[in-house]
């Protein structure tokens, strides 16, 4: 089973309260969490990654248990060995493209050296055609270059699975189509479990083998991609 998820979390903001209770299991290598804004998709991804602590439940990916409250298992985000691409990419503005990618290879918070040689970093710079901008800073990059840098940083430590939070939301339609195609090719090349969240029908059709539909903090269905976008 690629994905075995059962998580609960009560989120509070002032007087507002949001109850998240997400449960799904799937053998799909390319899984999509699909639903409207406010459904709880991003919070679910953060719980899986260990960025946010759940109130209870279980997370197992590829048969490896990352969190289980009954067994007192709660691996740190680093120990979970998951690649995470944030919606805003979360690149360090004071680091170059090469340093941003290399940062994922370091322990602790010291910045990578500007000219540090690392074959794994160079591999992903090559894969995403970033050589021309490897010394540039995030504010000097296009939207597509920022996304490729974020993907390279997520993949450079050879994660057990890749989590993607609305990866095309900030891009215009032509670039979105181009990068959607690139990600599809990457999924075929890497063949690691991928969990992508989106509210875009085109992402679902292009990038998912199975779709888990969410609404108001709950799973409301699981379908093949075409059935999900038609429902």
Image (tube, rainbow, N blue to C red):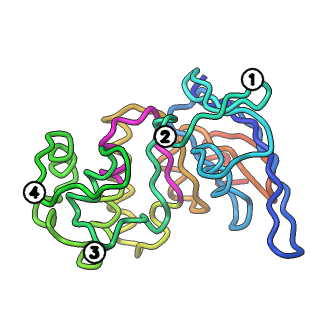
Magenta highlight on residue 157: yes
Verify CB contact (< 8 Å) between mark 4 and mark 3.
Answer: no
Residue holding disc 1: 71
Decide if residue 179 is on the left or right side of residue 52.
left
Judge whether 220 appears above or below 165 on screen.
above
Task: Classify residue 144 by image quadrant.
Answer: bottom left
Mark drawn on residue 194: 2
Q: Earlier in the sequence, mark 2 or mark 3?
A: 3
- Which structural element holds mark 2? strand
Q: Are marks 4 and 2 in contact (CB under 8 Å)?
A: no
x%, y% of residue 10?
83, 55
Q: Which residue is mark 4?
A: 115
Q: Quadrant of the N terminus?
A: top right
Q: Is residue 46 depicted above or below 222 in this figure?
A: below
Residue at image coords 57%, 45%: 49
Q: CA distance from mark 2 to mark 1?
A: 26 Å
Tell me the element at label 1.
helix
Q: CA distance from mark 1 to mark 4?
A: 44 Å
Check if mark 3's residue and mark 1's residue have beta carbons within 8 Å. Answer: no
Say which quarter of the image contains residue 191: top left
The residue carrying pointer 4 sits among few (fewer than 14), some (14 to 19) or many (20 or more) residues within 10 Å by Cα, namely: few
Residue 49 within the segment the image draws in magenta = no
């Amino acid at each position: 089973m690629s994905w075995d998820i059962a998580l609960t979390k009560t989120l509070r903001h002032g007087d507002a309260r949001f109850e998240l209770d997400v449960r799904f299991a799937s053998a799909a290598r390319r899984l999509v969490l699909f639903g409207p804004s406010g459904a709880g998709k991003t919070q679910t991804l953060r719980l899986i990654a260990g960025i946010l602590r759940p109130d209870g439940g279980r997370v197992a990916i590829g048969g490896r248990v990352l969190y289980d409250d009954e067994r007192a298992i709660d691996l740190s985000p680093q120990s979970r060995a998951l690649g995470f691409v944030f919606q805003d990419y979360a690149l360090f503005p004071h680091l170059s493209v090469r340093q941003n990618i290399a940062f994922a290879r370091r322990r602790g918070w010291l910045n990578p050296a500007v000219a540090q040689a690392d074959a794994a970093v160079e591999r992903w710079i090559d894969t995403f055609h970033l050589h021309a901008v490897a010394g540039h800073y995030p504010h000097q990059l296009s939207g597509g270059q920022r996304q490729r840098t974020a993907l390279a940083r997520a993949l450079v430590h050879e994660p057990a699975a890749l989590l993607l939070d609305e990866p095309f939301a900030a891009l215009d339609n032509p670039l979105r189509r181009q990068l959607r195609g690139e990600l599809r090719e990457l999924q075929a090349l890497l063949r690691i479990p991928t969990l992508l969240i989106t509210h875009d029908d085109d992402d679902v059709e292009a990038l998912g083998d199975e779709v888990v539909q969410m609404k108001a903090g709950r799973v409301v269905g699981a379908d093949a991609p075409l059935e999900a976008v038609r429902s």
